[in-house]
Image (tube, rainbow, N blue to C red):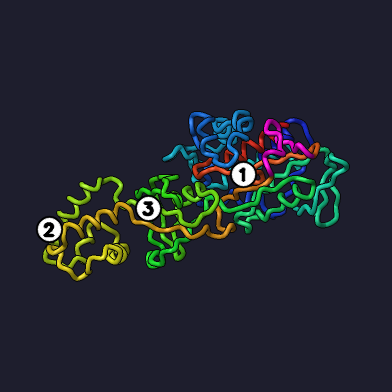
Amino acid sequence: MMAAGTAAKNGNKVILIEKNKILGKKLLITGKGRCNVTNAADDVELLIQNVPQNGTFLYSSFYTFTNADTMQFFEELGVPLKVERGERVFPISDKSADIVNALRKFCTDNRVEFKTAEVSNLLMQGNKILGAKLRTGEILNADKVIVATGGISYPQTGSTGDGYKFAQAVGHTIVSPKPSLVPLETIEKWVSELMGLSLKNVAISLANKAGKTIYTDFGEMIFTHFGVSGPIVLSASSHIRGDISGHKLQIDLKPALTHEQLDLRIQRDFLKYQNKDFKNSLADLLPQRLIDIVIKLSNVPPDKKTHSVTKVERTNLVNLLKSLTVTVKSFRPIDEAIITSGGVSTKEIDSSTMQSKLVEGLYFCGEVIDVDAYTGGFNLQIAFSTGYLAGSS
């Protein structure tokens, strides 16, 4: 929609082909339906730093249409915005539909023609684009074509990898798609006993197989029947490149307390419950559902009297609460990922125009390209910036 509206605003006759019955189906579910539309980072360099896959390819896009431009764009279309923790930008209404409606209005105001149809393939003569052929057999002649089909995550929204097929058929290299911003499966089976338990204000640390810390974060996570998910886990997943097995995720359940402070806190609780069993001494410290698991992992007998717990056992408990560790086994399937990593090779796209280096008149924008970012509004900014650049080119 950004690409189509921008191209039409520049005086081109534009047809936007959408295979879904409604526009912006995937946009409607982003940010849990609230739409984290961009990130208010005050420097383009910060945007680049949050794109681990081919971030430097986006310099022209991000400078041509900045995050400030995105915010101004939506505000001028009647969608007031707000900035939340981590510089995440949302509509004040918390409704992603307001963003979709604004983009639709942008297109309509600039006389974009909408067509509900499915493209079967691109049409070419030599190395020049001629248009597109629809599944119905209808031919649409065009001297420029922008492929903005997204990746292959959330296929129920229409992201089924069509753009990869179109690009590959005309000679482009596709970097093998894989999930990014995706829940993680763990080796430990005890996580399933905590399914649905959400933890707020915890800290995580992700280490690779060699034991090197590759990511830390603070915020909210959730246990699932297969492993772990939630905002900070999804962000952590995008830092795992190459072999996933053997990565370890440490969860600090009490990040506001040092080891010493936590030990003192536990001593106070133990004093309070000194004549009770150990299993009845942690209710003030942990969510009820977490207590049984912590007791099991601590190796302290649950029916041991609290006043009999040794200093060594208490130290082990402190260490457990400060680094509850799970071993990553695999990513969840790609159709559960928020975004796709991989896509049309950036080496074959002119970063200053988004035009193919192989096919004259063919352009790419958004997730179909081999770029992906962390959570926080960065992926939508990629969509808007590359869409604007492709449309204006």
Identify residue type, mark 3.
Gln
Instruction: Tell me, yes or no, whether the highlighted magenta stretch contains residue 175.
Output: no
- Front residue of 99/374: it is 374
- Front residue of 86/238: it is 238
Residue at the outermost front position: 210
Q: Considering only order in the chain, which callout, 1 or 2, is on the residue closer to the N terminus?
A: 1
| Spatial CA span between label 3 and label 2 | 29 Å
Q: Considering only order in the chain, which callout, 3 or 1, is on the residue closer to the N terminus?
A: 1
Tell me where the magenta segment starts and ends, as one range. Answer: 345-358
| Spatial CA span between label 2 and label 1 | 59 Å
Instruction: Tell me, yes or no, whether the highlighted magenta stretch contains residue 348.
Output: yes
Q: Disc 2 or disc 1, which is closer to the eye?
A: 2
| Spatial CA span between label 1 and label 3 | 42 Å
Disc marking residue 271: 2
At 44% from the left and 63% from the top, the residue drawn is 187
Q: Is residue 355 left or right of residue 197?
A: right
Disc marking residue 101: 1
SS type, badge 1: helix
Q: Which secondary structure class fits the magenta region best?
A: loop
